[in-house]
Image (cartoon, helix red, strand yellow):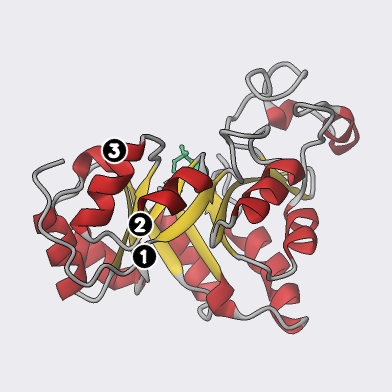
Amino acid sequence: MSTPAANTARKPFTVIGHRGAAGHAPENTLLSIDTAIRLGAHWIEIDIQHHAGELWLMHDLTLDRTTNGRGLLRAHSAAALRRLDAGRGEHIPTLPEALDLIEQRVSVNIELKSWDGCAAAVAACLREYLADGWAPERLQVSSFHLPELWEFKQLLPEVPLGVLYCGVPLDWAGLTAELGAQSLNISAEFVDARLVADAHARGRQLNVYTVNDPAALRLLYELGVDGVFSDFPDRALAAS
Ligand code: G3P
Ligand code: MG
């Protein structure tokens, strides 16, 4: 990160609880989401994989790091996945379970992760929640897999998109515009004042992941970024 330009407007940034509040509770569990809401996060980010007819909240392709299971998630039946312990007795939730817990108390960033794609399944799920009264602006679907986002956009164009980058592609602006994405969600080490200004000049929000250090959070606030993903939403709230 370069030296920040002054954030003269001092508008608080949006605090996005990463995998819920992964610094305080087992990531991508209902407990983690509940903890993030209790801490005051404005948004919750969750990772989604489609397998065996369900949309699972799971970051890794394998179960080993976050559950008492072993091997690939996709090698297990839905019944077997439901029996696993995802930490502190929590189970691996599904997207409907997460949305039913959240009940629009906070907004939700749904990150598409699956190998085989999950755009169509997520669109089908969210279509039902929109029909039940969820406001599309309380949702954002994001992915590093931009063709997945393109597919999602064709299926459910009313839900805003976030383009995920771990770096700054030469044509980041063109790709973001082509998708009509609301925001550029980018890894913290690639953010500087020039990128913030460029994104804002192009009408895009800039959200930064994953930031847990108080000094880095403060620096990003001074730079004028729009939002931060943090495992510790309480720290992010304290920085702005
Ligand atoms: O969406 C922000 C961030 O979650 C992207 O990276 O690997 O933590 O899903 P990752
Ligand atoms: Mg994620």
Residue at image position (12%, 55%) is: 193
**Where is the N terminus found, in terms of image quarters?**
top left
Residue 231, given in percent of the width and then of the height, sits at 51, 39
Q: Helix, strand or loop at disc 2?
A: loop
Q: CA distance from mark 1 to mark 2?
A: 5 Å
Q: Which residue is mark 2?
A: 240
Q: Helix, strand or loop at disc 1?
A: loop
Residue 199 in view of the camera: yes
Pointer 1 and pointer 2: residues touching (CB < 8 Å)?
yes
Residue at image position (12%, 60%) is: 6
Residue at image position (75%, 68%) is: 103
**227 vs 144, nearest the viewer:** 227
Disc marking residue 215: 3
Q: Amino acid at mark 3?
A: Ala
Q: Quadrant of residue 210?
A: top left
Residue 233, given in percent of the width and then of the height, sits at 51, 47
Q: Quadrant of residue 190?
A: top left
Residue 121, given in percent of the width and then of the height, sits at 68, 59
Q: Which residue is mark 1?
A: 12
Residue 128, given in percent of the width and then of the height, sits at 75, 75
Q: Amino acid at mark 2?
A: Ser
Q: In the rendered view, does 138 fall on the left or right side of 181?
A: right
Residue at image position (84%, 33%) is: 77
Residue 3 position (above or below residue 137) = above
Q: Residues within 10 Å of mark 2 (few under 14, many from 20)?
A: some
Q: In the rendered view, does 82 fall on the left or right side of 111?
A: right
